[in-house]
Image (tube, rainbow, N blue to C red):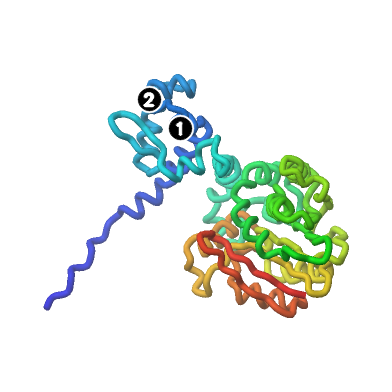
Amino acid sequence: MSSAAAPKPSPELIFGTLTSYQRAFALKAGIELELFTAVAEGATDPASLGKRLNAAERGVRILADYLTIEGFLRKENGRYSLTPDSAVFLDKRSPAYLGSMSRFLTSEQNIANMWMLTDSVRQGGTASHIGDNSKPSDDRWVNFARSMGAMAVPMAGVLSQVVNANPAGEIRVLDIAAGHGMYGITVAKNNPRVHVTALDWPAVLAVASENAQKAGVADRFSTLEGSAFEASLGEGFDYIFITNFLHHFDVASNEMLLRRFHSALKPGGKTITVEFVPNEDRVTPPMAAGFSLVMLAHTDAGDAYTFPEYEKMHRAAGFGNCTLQIVPELPQRLVIGEK
């Protein structure tokens, strides 16, 4: 009985990976041109798309064909239509629109940092001169705040379920490095007893305050300007949200931060950390494990930490209990520490 022949070596993965930037920039172009919205509104052939987008018919045809090849559009009898994913996430009229993410994810700084990845690998941290995310960088983080808010809403809905829905009185939430503020804002919108204090740099907090106003929770949304490392945090908080923050720093810095957060909680209070948390093999699940490379490219010493590493950090900071919560259908996980 002969065994099946081993597959022949192929350069397909290598070639496809080295040209994958084309896919990213084609999608970016489609988003910037509002091509997906135009298709949804009825401009479904190259001629009508060209007129609608004020672009050359040839250019639109080639871009739309490529986006069809890559699975973002469908094409039949010379006419384009949206896939289900594109209809939900790339049509600007959709409440779940995510196209704004392209402004941050494909920003010049992000691309430049990946361009220098070889040097970052050699030195074990970003080769960029901007790798210390404990210092203000208004252009970068205001862009983040204006671009990435919609991405936070599904996990923010999960946080709304974790926060106690039936307290005796007001629920005080401190939102660390709040950015767009959508984690705390969404929880406040879903629970009228929640009051949020958002901590970040002044220019970033201006974006969060705008979002709180739009969401109708400005009367229960306060701001605290400064650094999580240095600002006077106060005390007596029921919950502290630490969303996509600890991955920027090394273990020692995180333990110091967590000690500060522990002091700001009331007895029985909880920190809720939202993070990419890989398994201990550090190669699964792919999206969480791959986030370590992002931190290598963009930070001096950040990483995607495993749950045992987070648990050890929390215990070193004085937390009596630390648990991991896996959220179905979302790539990030919750690490919950209790005082």
Quadrant in the picture for residue 258: bottom right
**What residue would you read off at disc 1?**
40
Looking at the rendered image, the quarter that the C terminus falls into is: bottom right
Check whether the beta carbons of the residues at disc 2 and disc 1 lie within 8 A of each other. Answer: no
Image position of 41 with respect to 126: above or below = above
Q: Is residue 19 left or right of residue 122?
A: left
Image position of 185 with respect to 271: above or below = above
Q: Residue at x 40, y 49 (%)?
A: 18
Disc on res. 287: none
Work out whether residue 199 can be spotted: no
Tell me the kind of residue under disc 1: Ala
Work out whether residue 269 can be spotted: yes
Quadrant in the picture for residue 262: bottom right
**What residue would you read off at disc 2?**
46
Q: Is residue 215 left or right of residue 267?
A: left
Q: Residue at x 75, y 65 (%)?
A: 166
Tell me the kind of residue under disc 2: Pro
Say which element carries label 2: helix
Q: Residue at x 53, y 63 (%)?
A: 288
Q: Position of residue 336 (x, y in %)?
A: 68, 70
